[in-house]
Image (spheres, rainbow, N blue to C red):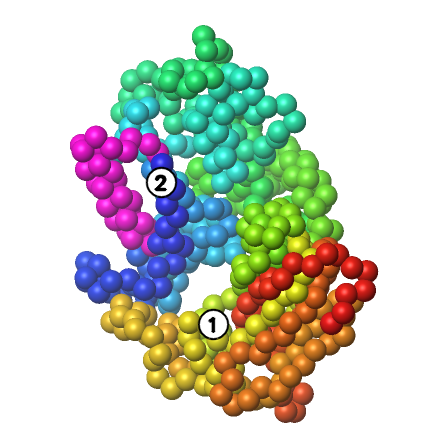
Amino acid sequence: FVRHNDDAPREPINIAALELAEHDQKQRAGTARGDHGGGGRRRLGRLTEQQDEEEDDGGGDGVVEKEEEEDDDRRGDDRDGEDFQYNSGMRGFKGSEYEGGHRVPFAVRYPRMGIVGGGGRAVDELTSYVDVMPTLLELCGCGGGGRGLWPPPSGRTFHGNSLVPLLLRGGNGHGGDTIPRPLAYASAADAEGDVEPEPEPNWKERIVVTDTQRIPYPLKWKQCSVMMNSWRLINRIELYDVSIDPGQTDDVSSSHPDIVSKLRMGYESWWDICEMQMDFETPLSLGGGGGGDGGGGSSPTAVGKVTVLNTQDIRNETAGDYVWNQGQVRAGAQCLGWWEINVETSGRYEFELRRWPREAGHGIASGIEGSDAEYRADDVCPDSSNWYRDGKALPIDTACLMISGKRQLSKTVGSDDTRATFEVDLDEGRLQIRAFFSGCAGYMNTAYYVYVKLIECKPPSADMAE
């Protein structure tokens, strides 16, 4: 089984010169950003060819998927050569509530069930990333009541639907009868006897919602698309039928008030589900024995384990105030905020504050002249070269660590120091951490990288010494 996420449909900022030569060029940067679909098809083709070779050798006949989640895509606008970004005639690009901002490719190949290449078969029904988990569970024979079939066991719920009925429809994708769903599990240990699968969902009536928030506190109806079959309700007001209007230029809301009303009701139901979690700050885990994403519980095995905090995960009250890419790090972009933390093991922790990542090895306040990394300059768009070279020196002379319930710690940063390290005793539980650098004239900036390590386990204490 292979799940392959390919960013080519999103925005392949860098494209090999040989592939670039295949296309007519208006300008280099424009074409490099424009070949989204082609890059994705080439990579999927190479992956399929490799699997065919493995099958000829007696190996792998599982699933090969290429997936991009709905609101993580950048199709772009055709803006007459002005930063051209191909989007197949759709409206909008990354972050947009219109079709070009969230409609993405999803390819599945499973030879054992007759889902193979050779041109494939298009599925027109509305599907979503929430359908992936139910689909995999059904294909693996994981279901309720020991049947090995979907739906899930009692007490387990999913917001998506299994796509197995759509994948099996038409047999091998080139006509023919639909494969009965139970036959897919003939070899599953818990699929006994003739079992009728759950009724297929009413795909034409299902409602899927996507939105873009990117603000500290979600707003109802902000940049949202409510989808049902080919209908798209945009921002509660505009209605489009993308089957006849893929560019979403003809608002037909006044002609279909019943559809508008139905989609608004669907959004309200979806919002009710989301709203239950909006006041819950999802914390990052420190000292967990089961991984850095929480849930591991107190564990001595966490000693020595390093968790890296970065500024993409900080919380603050300002929309967009975070640093998330190496271009921003090189430019010394400013952001301030805190990390929500769940300490899973009481003990002494080491906090290592850095402006540059460990592997870079540069001083906290130091700048960079030229390139400090090997990269293929010929394959990088000129307007993206700042991601790979140069770096701004920053007026830093002090490192500070603030942890809720404890006094602020600080130390002087020397001109050649690559890190500032603090040791703190922490109890199990929730807290907030701020780690930042300061300097002359009131300069402040969050440490882009904070490496946290549990040094020693200690029993919980109501008043642990610093």
- Camera-side residue of 237 and 250: 237
- Camera-side residue of 449 and 199: 449
- Give the residue at mark 2: 2
For the magenta stretch, what is the residue range?
36-63
Q: Residue 53 in magenta? A: yes
Residue at left offset 35%, top offset 34%: 63
**Residue 199 can be seen, yes or no:** no
Q: Where is residue 23 in the image (x, y as percent from the top left)?
A: 22, 59
Q: Which amino acid does label 2 sit on?
A: Val
Label 1 SS:
loop
Residue at left offset 57%, top offset 74%: 353
**Residue 32 can be seen, yes or no:** yes
For discs 1 and 2, the disc positioned in front in the rendered view: 1
Residues at marks 1 and 2, CA–CA distance in whole angstroms: 30 Å
Q: Where is residue 134 in the image (x, y as percent from the top left)?
A: 50, 31
Residue at left offset 47%, top offset 26%: 138
Q: Can you tell which mark lies on residue 357?
A: 1
Image quadrant in which you'd find residue 158: top right
Please give left or right for residue 386 compared with residue 462 in the image: left
Image quadrant in which you'd find residue 85: bottom left
Residue 26 sits above or below residue 208 on the image: below
- Camera-side residue of 197 and 425: 425
